[in-house]
Image (spheres, grey):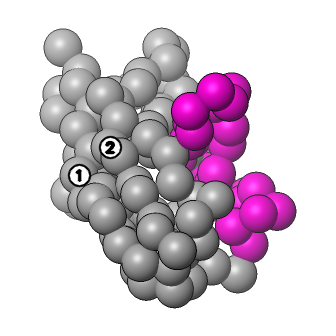
Amino acid sequence: QVQLRESGGGMVQAGGSLRLSCTASGSIFAINAMGWYRQAPGKQRELVASITSGGTINYADAVKGRFTISRDNAKNTMYLQMNDLKPEDTAVYYCNIVALLNYWGQGTQVTVSS
């Protein structure tokens, strides 16, 4: 059974940095894309960054220039480096893998104080 586990969330002051990790256990075949989403209280879940199997990367406008998505296939791990964090980045961050099935992690809280 495939499981995604996020880590690296926490509380940081505005301007600070965090790196989120998402490690997949189990075998996932035919991956189309991997990505990070976030959901703030009272808001819909939104895409933060994604990377396709071909390596195409996409960022939400709100995080361009501040966040970097990457992956280490050998470690079955995806990362989200978040720099210059802002209070509006506060949310629960989820990793997602789109393959034959759609997989989600349990989420990790990121809180940015002003």
Separation of marks 2 and 1 at Cα, in angstroms: 6 Å
Q: Does residue 89 lie above or below 64 as drawn? A: above
**Is residue 49 rendered to the left or right of residue 91?**
right
As rendered, which of 97 and 108 lies closer to the eye? 108
Q: What stretch is highlighted in magenta?
A: 36-64
Pointers 2 and 1 in contact (C-beta within 8 Å): yes
At x 42%, y 22%, the residue is 103
**How many residues crowd around disc 1 within 10 Å: few (fewer than 14), some, or many (20 or more)?**
some
Q: Does residue 21 lie above or below 97 as drawn? A: below
At x 58%, y 59%, the residue is 89
Q: Name the residue under label 1.
A: 7
User: What is the quadrant of the N terminus in the image?
Assistant: top left
Q: Position of residue 67 (x, y in %)?
A: 58, 72
**How many residues crowd around disc 2 within 10 Å: few (fewer than 14), some, or many (20 or more)?**
many
Q: Mark 2 points at which residue?
A: 108
Q: Where is residue 110 in the image (x, y as percent from the top left)?
A: 40, 54
**Is residue 73 rendered to the left or right of residue 60?**
left
In the rendered image, residue 107 lying in the magenta stretch gets the answer: no
